[in-house]
């Protein structure tokens, strides 16, 4: 599946998209350059440790919203793992955020059985998904640069070749 929205949005484009689709997609904190800052929201990993997305400043981050009931999410997860493995030593942080409706036991079983090598968080209240837009469709993946700016939002499975090119560009910056 190709992404429906795979380019950075200006504030005007975001408003037009929201107005014309009626889906209410938006990113918080749009800056002058049309990019949005990553939300300063905390998340709890499956191991119980607490973190904030803003803690990744100075690193490139891949934030993937997914669900165990989402066939595209399950299908793309090996590519997310491969992407993480390929770039983690260069400073890529990866977080898989399970949606509020996903049963925690399913998420834990999925993460353990597939030995996910990156951070996995549960969005128990929906606050994380709301802070990012809100995220309403899975998978939705955000790419964040070293300055903490969201530079790309993919709805659906990304074109991984293009995603890798973007990550390499951001890591080199």
Image: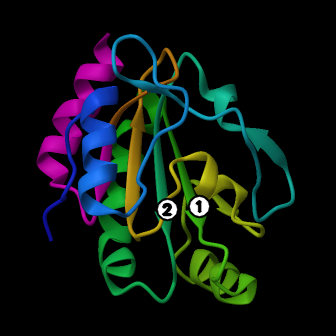
Q: Nearer the viewer, residue 99 or 25?
A: 25
**Disc 1 vs disc 2: Cβ atoms closer than 8 Å?**
yes
Per the image, the residue denoted by label 1 is 97
User: Which is the main secondary structure of the residues drawn in magenta?
Assistant: helix
Q: Nearer the viewer, residue 158 or 23?
A: 23
Residue at image position (46%, 32%) is 89
- For marks 1 and 2, the one nearer the N-term is 2
Task: Give the structural element (helix, strand or loop) at label 2.
Answer: strand
Q: Position of residue 31 (x, y in %)?
A: 45, 16
Magenta span:
153-173
Q: On the rendered image, what quadrant is the C terminus found in?
A: top left
Q: Is residue 13 above or below residue 94?
A: above
Q: Position of residue 140 (x, y in %)?
A: 39, 60
Q: Nearer the viewer, residue 149 or 50?
A: 149
Magenta stretch: includes residue 30: no
Which residue is the extreme one toward the front?
19
Task: Give the structural element (helix, strand or loop) at label 1.
Answer: strand
Q: Position of residue 114 (x, y in %)?
A: 51, 77
Residue at image position (15%, 71%) is 1
Per the image, the residue denoted by label 2 is 65
């Amino acid at each position: 599946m190709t992404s429906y929205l795979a380019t950075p949005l200006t504030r005007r484009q975001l408003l037009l998209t929201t107005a014309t689709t009626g889906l209410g997609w938006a990113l918080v904190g749009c800056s002058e350059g049309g990019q949005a800052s990553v939300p300063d929201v905390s998340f709890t990993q499956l191991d119980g440790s607490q973190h904030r997305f803003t803690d990744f400043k100075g690193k490139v981050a891949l934030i993937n919203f997914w669900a165990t009931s989402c066939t595209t999410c399950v299908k793309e997860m090996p590519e997310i793992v491969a992407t993480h493995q390929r770039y983690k030593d260069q400073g890529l942080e990866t977080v898989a955020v399970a949606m509020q409706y996903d049963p925690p036991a399913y998420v834990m079983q999925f993460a353990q059985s597939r030995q996910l090598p990156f951070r996995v968080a549960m969005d128990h209240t929906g606050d994380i998904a709301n802070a990012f837009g809100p995220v309403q469709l899975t998978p939705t993946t955000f790419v964040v640069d070293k300055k903490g700016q969201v530079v790309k939002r993919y709805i659906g499975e990304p074109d991984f070749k293009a995603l890798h090119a973007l990550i390499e560009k951001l890591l080199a910056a």
